[in-house]
Structure formats: C-alpha cells, structure tokens
Image (spheres, coloured by chain):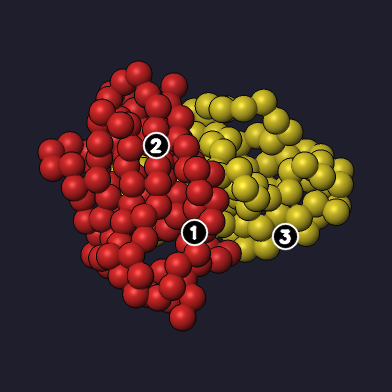
Chain colours: A red, B yellow
Amino acid sequence: AQSVTQLDSQVPVFEEAPVELRCNYSSSVSVYLFWYVQYPNQGLQLLLKYLSGSTLVESINGFEAEFNKSQTSFHLRKPSVHISDTAEYFCAVSDSTGFQKLVFGTGTRLLVSP
Amino acid sequence: SQTIHQWPATLVQPVGSPLSLECTVEGTSNPNLYWYRQAAGRGLQLLFYSVGIGQISSEVPQNLSASRPQDRQFILSSKKLLLSDSGFYLCAWSGSQPTGGAFFGQGTRLTVV
C-alpha cells in the first residue's frame, strides 16, 4: 500500500517570493505521482504529474516538481508566487502497476500575501 | 472534451435522514469512477470506486453505499445519516489506464445537523 506525507499544513509567503511545498511518499512498488490544487469550495484540479522519464515536470502556470526516488520525494516549487496561487495543494500517489487508486496527502494550504 | 457534473453543491440534512448524491460524466465511455470524502485537515479519503456498471468496491466500512446504474453515472447513498457523515464529497473519474490522473467534480458540501 502507498502513503503520502505532507508535513506542512500551511505555508505563508509573500508575493513574488519562492516557495516549496514538500511531499514524501512510501510505496513498495513503482508509482505515479501527482500534484493537485484546490481553490475554496471547489473540486481538485490536476496541476502536474510524474509518470516516467525526466524527473523534473512542469505545469503551465510556473510550478514544477522533481521526483527523487532515493529520497522518495516529489516536492512542488515555484520561483515567484502570485496572490492567485493561494489555494490548497495535494500530493497524491498511485500504483503504476495496476488499478489507479489515488492516495492523497493531507494537503498544504499556501497563503500568499502582498 | 470530458466533463463531470456533481450535484447538489451544498446540502444540509438532519440526522437519520436519507442521502443521495449524483455524479455524471460526459465525453468518455467506460470511465473508472470514484467517490472521495474530504474532512478538515485529513486530506481525501477514497470511499468507493467502480470499474464498470454494477461493479462497486468499498475502501472503508461506513454508513454509506454507492451504485453505478449506468456507465457514466455514480450515486452515493445513505439510508440514515450520522453527524460524522458531514464533509466535502468529491466525485472523480479516470481512464482505465493509470497514467492520466483523476478528474474531479466541484464537490458537495454535506452538513448533517
């Protein structure tokens, strides 16, 4: 079985500052990794995913995440955040060898202030 | 393109009353369907998933049940709601291959009073 740990429940940053949201996972099999973003009272939107190949994946709005197999991590980064990035971010993992059940972390609330 | 509809957006129900939440997907066939519950500070918990009509797998024992009467319709039900059933319920779909991630509806905020 897989598990995901997001140690930071809340990350406050100032606008235009860099940010890193941490995600560590545990699995005995190969996995796919995902980051989702949730705005207040809305569903989750897929932000980016790692399936295979290059360990650095990017989203269209400036976020990137790097898969580190030795550290079992998939941290999310952005070099300069905007007010509009304020949201909750969820890391998720699924077993790459079979049926896709997403296992989520508890989420990190990113608070961007001016 | 594919879309997922989930309703209602909010619901306030008394303890002991029944529940029915509906989710439909458009623009794809034979999707995998999921019901998740989000409780404050606890991330998302997978409640049920389905790989086809009438095929339901339950992840955790609870006061809820799910049904899939049609290929693109997924229903979450309860005969008698408990206070602990309050939460944010999310329906999602994915393809049969595990590479695409899941796509979520807008969610239903259920408050049991």
Labels 3 and 2 share a subunit: no
In this rendering, position of residue B14 left or right of residue B53: right
Q: Nearer the viewer, mark 3 or mark 2?
A: 2
Q: Chain of mark 1?
A: A
Residue at the spot of label 1: A11
- The local secondary structure at tag 1 comes to strand
Residue at (34%, 28%) from the top-left corner? A95
Label 3 vs label 2: CA separation? Answer: 35 Å
Residue at the spot of label 2: A24
Question: Which sits earlier in the primary sequence, circle 2 or circle 1?
Answer: 1
Q: Chain of mark 3?
A: B
Residue at (45%, 35%) from the top-left corner? A4
Q: Is residue A63 above or below residue B50?
A: below
Residue at the spot of label 3: B11
Residue at (53%, 44%) from the top-left corner? A106
In this rendering, position of residue A107 left or right of residue A91: right
Label 3 vs label 1: CA separation? Answer: 31 Å
Residue at (27%, 50%) from the top-left corner? A65
| Amino acid type at image mark 1 | Val
Q: Residue A62: image x %, image y %?
A: 25, 65
